[in-house]
Amino acid sequence: MAEVPEAPAPETPAPAPQPAKPREGWRTHPLPKRLVLIAIVAVGLWLWKVTDVPERQLILQLEGPGWSDVRAMDLQVVDSEEHILKREERFFADGPPPEVTFKASLPEGTFQTLLLLKVRDREQWLPLRGRLAVGEKEAIVHSLRLPDTRR
């Protein structure tokens, strides 16, 4: 048999050397640009939360006789400029519970309150006026006694 001379394998050309890639610095990296945006959003959210008026609980403790005749309550919290900050009505079939809780977003300060009560067998609402001092606490407890309504 005759030997077939092996054909020389075609030489693959060596890959051309690529020019040296410039090393990325922190100024050309995309991360610092994103971090600035994230920092701006975080500061904005923090400022929004810090300047927000906290939600507080106004707890009315109803003491004394006569509360079982009350069928409705209308609470109004008014600031010094006579703007109503909070108004809420509650209705009761058998009189209110011993503690009635209202939630309100109130800043620190002193406010006027007007609690209108609808008493069974009376056409007119009975007004109870008072002052509400709001401090740093989240819960504000206020005790109320029903005035004599036998007139």
Image (cartoon, grey):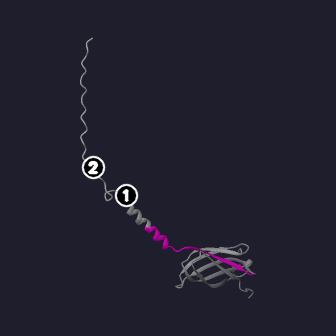
Three-letter code, disc 2 = Lys
Residue 84 drawn at (x, y percent): 55, 80
Image quarter (top left, top right, bottom left or bottom right) of the N terminus: top left
- Up the image or down, 48 lies above or below 12; here it is below
Image quarter (top left, top right, bottom left or bottom right) of the C terminus: bottom right
Residue at position x 25%, y 36% in the image: 14
Task: Judge whether residue 11 is colored magenta.
Answer: no
> Pointer 1 and pointer 2: residues touching (CB < 8 Å)?
no
Instruction: Say whether residue 60 is left or right of residue 79.
Output: right
Residue at numbered disc 2: 21
- Up the image or down, 1 lies above or below 16; here it is above
Q: Earlier in the sequence, mark 1 or mark 2?
A: 2
Instruction: Say whether residue 96 is left or right of residue 102.
Output: right
- In terms of image quadrants, where is residue 73? bottom right
Total residue callouts? 2
Q: Which residues are magenta?
A: 43-64
Residue at numbered disc 1: 31
Residue at position x 54%, y 85% in the image: 80
- In terms of image quadrants, where is residue 116? bottom right
